[in-house]
Image (cartoon, coloured by chain):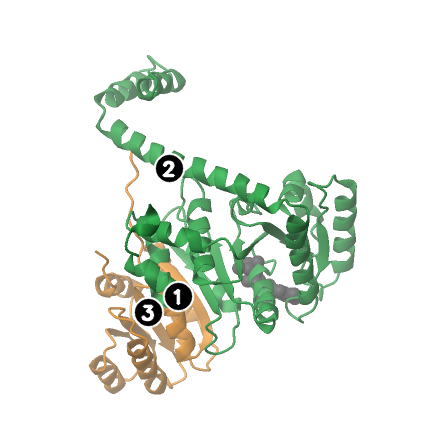
């Protein structure tokens, strides 16, 4: 009975609108610190109201700039907005430079906005687990819309669908090659496409090309991705972009698909969380297991092979064995 | 042997208050800190003290680095420090870089700036100092 327990101080802070408590809790989540658990549990019932929009696409296409435009648009409607911007960590140093804030303009002193930059930190299970929980904190904090920006390991981040109910893929003119290389995956991710930098030549052609591709494709549960041209620079097309994103959210509700899509995301979250724990436990046990050393020697002397060695270890850990 | 060891990276905010448009130095420092394994939130040019403090809060950083080449450091840096206190951001040390005369550096340190780096400071010194002064988490 989670609700009977006293509210952890950080959770109480988040519910009272304390920005430092929110930020601190986000750090605990990022660090996969067990201390975050009780606060997350206490806040879970308070989340679930925010619209979560995922934005992905190659580096430099203007994702952050578009978010800045959307931010102004949404604040104009009185909506509170949380932004989570995820950038890759360097595989070498583990460090990163997170520069998305540079593009994110906001009115001075506006407390209806909360921006958090996150490094991917090379999590085994991807960034989804951490991002999801950070989004949920912003949700419980009372944000009406949460926007998540990711680049992902390829040019777009497939995992964005694990986090967001509506996904936007941003591209730029002369994207022929990109679309080719992204292939079908692109169309599975995007609920909405935005061709940004429409102030540059070639934008109309790119948008037309994408529209044709969309028209040729099949729709997903009755939704066909929308294609919007915009320029974050001018700015132009921002209200239309929001309209397209909101239309997908409305569609989910109208068709009664929201619950099913949430259930699907929760299912993957659950599997991911169990997987994380199992992985940790396994690594811990293997670390102390004398058989590992013997198997490594056998591998090096070519007296066994990696699959056989893995099979041997796996059998001994299987719960039913 | 099988287990990857987990370390929590130091998070540092690098910001440039003031109106000058030169952020090469700040970017070089940002990259050096990244290469030392830190997560650097780069806030960019022309940040107001209010924006810097808001970013420090939202990003829950362990350290703030300010750079200013316009000569306005004595107006801007103390305001950042005051605002940090006002917003109850505790234990987040501030270091400064830029063209800062010795006399100003001494005054800045008196009001709580933990380290001041002049134009000739080596990146090694900056990284080492940043590591030493960054807020430690239990
Ligand atoms: N010409 C033009 N440049 C843009 C536009 N939107 C963004 N940019 C520029 O593209 C670069 C990358 O933008 P950014 O928002 O950081 O891209 P992100 O990496 O996708 O987040 C920056 O130099 C922006 O100023 C646009 O609509 N038109
Ligand atoms: Mg960006």
Question: Quarter holding the N terminus of chain B?
Answer: top left
Query: Which color was chain A given?
Result: green
Which of pointers 1 and 3 indicates the residue nearer the eye? 1
Query: In the depicted view, which residue is nearer to us: A269 or B57?
Result: A269
Identify residue for label 3.
B64
Q: Chain of mark 3?
A: B
Q: Position of residue A56 (x, y in %)?
A: 57, 52
Question: Quarter holding the C terminus of chain B?
Answer: bottom left
Q: Is mark 3 within 8 Å of ligand 2?
A: no
Question: In the rendered view, does A163 fall on the left or right side of A42?
Answer: right
Which of pointers 3 and 2 indicates the residue nearer the eye? 2
Give a yes or no on whether discs 2 and 1 share a subunit: no
Which mark is on residue A32? Answer: none
Query: Which color was chain B given?
Result: orange
Query: Which one is earlier in the sequence, the residue at label 1 or at label 3?
Result: 1
Query: In the depicted view, which residue is nearer to us: B13 or B130?
Result: B13
Question: In the rendered view, does A240 fall on the left or right side of B111?
Answer: right
Q: Position of residue B116 (x, y in %)?
A: 27, 75
Query: In the depicted view, which residue is nearer to us: A136 or A163?
Result: A136
Q: Chain of mark 1?
A: B
Which mark is on residue A276? Answer: 2
The secondary structure type at the circle numbered 2 is helix
Q: CA distance from mark 2 to mark 1?
A: 27 Å
Give a yes or no on whether discs 1 and 3 share a subunit: yes
Crowding at dot 1, Cα within 10 Å, few <14 / some 14-19 / many 20+, comes out as: many
Q: Which residue is found at the position 60% from the left and 51% from the top? A: A166
Q: Chain of mark 2?
A: A
Q: CA distance from mark 3 to mark 2?
A: 33 Å
Give a yes or no on whether discs 3 and 2 share a subunit: no
Q: Which residue is found at the position 52% from the left and 44% from the top? A: A162
Q: From the viewer's perspective, is residue A147 above or below residue B4?
A: below
Which mark is on residue B58? Answer: 1
């Amino acid at each position: 009975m989670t609700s009977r327990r006293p509210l952890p101080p950080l959770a109480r802070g988040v519910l009272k609108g304390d920005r430092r408590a929110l930020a601190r809790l986000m750090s605990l989540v990022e660090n996969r610190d067990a201390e975050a658990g009780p606060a997350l549990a206490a806040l879970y019932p308070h989340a679930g109201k925010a619209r979560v929009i995922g934005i992905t696409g190659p580096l430099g296409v203007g994702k952050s700039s578009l978010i800045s435009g959307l931010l102004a648009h949404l604040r104009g409607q009185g909506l509170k907005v949380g932004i989570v911007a995820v950038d890759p960590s360097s595989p070498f140093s583990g460090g990163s430079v997170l520069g998305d804030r540079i593009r994110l303009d906001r009115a001075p002193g506006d407390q209806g906005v909360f921006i958090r930059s996150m490094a991917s930190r090379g999590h085994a299970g991807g960034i989804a687990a951490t991002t999801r929980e950070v989004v949920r904190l912003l949700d419980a904090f009372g944000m009406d819309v949460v926007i998540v920006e990711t680049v992902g390991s390829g040019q777009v981040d497939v995992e964005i669908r694990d986090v967001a109910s509506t996904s936007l893929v941003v591209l730029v003119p002369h994207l022929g090659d990109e679309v080719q290389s992204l292939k079908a995956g692109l169309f599975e991710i995007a609920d909405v496409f935005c061709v940004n930098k429409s102030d540059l030549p070639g934008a109309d052609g790119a948008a037309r090309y994408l529209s044709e591709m969309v028209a040729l494709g099949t729709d997903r549960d009755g939704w066909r991705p929308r294609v919007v041209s915009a320029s974050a620079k001018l700015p132009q097309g921002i209200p239309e972009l929001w309209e397209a994103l909101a239309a997908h959210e409305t569609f989910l509700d109208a068709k009664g698909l929201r619950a099913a899509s949430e259930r699907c995301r929760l299912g993957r979250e659950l599997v991911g969380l169990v997987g994380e724990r199992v992985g940790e436990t396994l690594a811990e046990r293997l670390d102390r297991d004398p058989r590992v050393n013997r198997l490594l020697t056998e591998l090096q002397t070519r007296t066994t092979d990696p699959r056989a060695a893995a099979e041997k270890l796996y059998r001994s850990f299987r719960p039913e064995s | 042997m099988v287990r990857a060891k987990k370390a929590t990276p130091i998070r540092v905010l690098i910001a440039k208050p003031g109106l000058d448009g030169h952020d090469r130095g700040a970017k070089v420092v940002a990259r050096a800190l990244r290469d030392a394994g830190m997560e650097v939130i780069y806030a960019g040019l022309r940040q107001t003290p209010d924006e810097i403090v808001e970013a420090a809060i939202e990003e829950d950083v362990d350290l703030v680095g300010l750079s200013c080449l316009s000569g306005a450091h004595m107006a801007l840096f103390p305001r950042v420090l005051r605002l940090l206190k006002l917003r109850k951001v505790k234990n987040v040390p501030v270091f400064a870089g830029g063209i800062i005369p010795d006399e100003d550096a001494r005054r800045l340190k008196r009001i709580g700036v933990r380290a001041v780096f002049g134009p000739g400071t080596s990146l090694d010194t900056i990284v080492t100092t940043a590591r030493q002064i960054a807020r430690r988490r239990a």
